Image (spheres, rainbow, N blue to C red):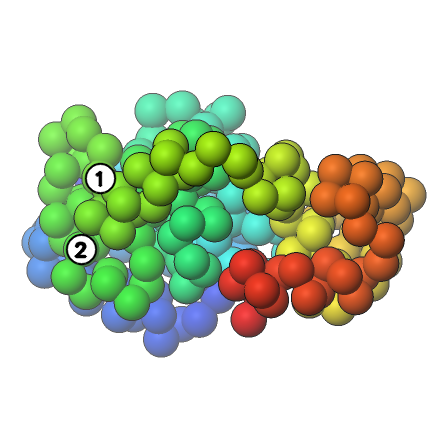
Amino acid sequence: MNILIADDHAVVRRGLRDILAEALPGDNFIEAGTGDEVISQLAKSPIGLAVLDINMPGRSGLDVLKDIKLSHPRLPVIILSVQPEEQYAVRCLRAGAAAYISKDSAADELGKAVKKILSGGRYISASVADSLLTNLDRSEKPPHELLSDREFEVMRRLASGSSLTSIGNQLHVSVKTISTYRARIMEKMQMGSNAELTRYALRHKLIE
């Protein structure tokens, strides 16, 4: 089986490859450093499993996941991230991910997750399960959970200080489109400036 490992850092890809090689001896590994490379590799070779970093240059891993699910709906995808699980796990699982794993726990959990997923299941870590239960128990959602996945991604980039032009280039859409997203974000979150977004994002650990 071919396993696709996507991360923009070669040293991380090497570490993931070592973990997966131990869990799945004899399989082949294909690497990608960007979302566009992921889509290109899927067109070149039959892939049995994809391990995808959510934070790569250009298009977000969440966007790439959605594209994969459209073109290869049966392909299991594991999302890896350094982002807080409570902010991204639910979005990724809803988008079709077979698992969402923190990079900090990848050494312990990735092998177990792969074996469960390849037997036809989905993998949820104890911490993700706790996060899901917390979301169910919460009677009132915070403003950022009202955003669509694309609005959420644009909000994080705005809060991190990226310009409309830069975000448009990264997401391959026009500045006008990003401006429209920004207006929707401000309306939904009832905020009036990027500085307010930044303070909010830092307080809720949406950015570092």
Please state if 116 lies on the left or on the right of 96 as rendered: left
Residue 54 locus on image (x, y percent): 47, 53
Secondary element at tag 2 = helix
- Where residue 143 sits, quadrant-wise, is top right
- Crowd tier of the residue under label 2, counting other residues whose Cα lies within 10 Å: few below 14, some 14–19, many 20 or above: some
Relative to 4, residue 22 above or below: below
Secondary element at tag 1 = loop
Task: Residue at 66% x, 60% y: name it.
Answer: 200
Query: Callout 1, which amino acid?
Result: Tyr
Name the foreground residue: 35 vs 144: 144
- Whether tag 2 and tag 1 are in contact, CB under 8 A, the answer is yes
State which quarter of the image contains the C terminus. Answer: bottom right
Task: Residue at 74% x, 38% y: name it.
Answer: 188
Name the foreground residue: 145 vs 141: 141
Please state if 77 lies on the left or on the right of 170 as rendered: left
Query: Callout 2, which amino acid?
Result: Glu
Residue 57 locus on image (x, y percent): 60, 61
Q: Is residue 153 visible?
A: yes
Relative to 19, residue 139 above or below: above
Name the foreground residue: 82 vs 168: 82
- Crowd tier of the residue under label 1, counting other residues whose Cα lies within 10 Å: few below 14, some 14–19, many 20 or above: many
User: Which of the numbered marks, if any, corresponds to residue 109?
Assistant: 2
- Where residue 31 sits, quadrant-wise, is bottom left
Residue holding disc 1: 123
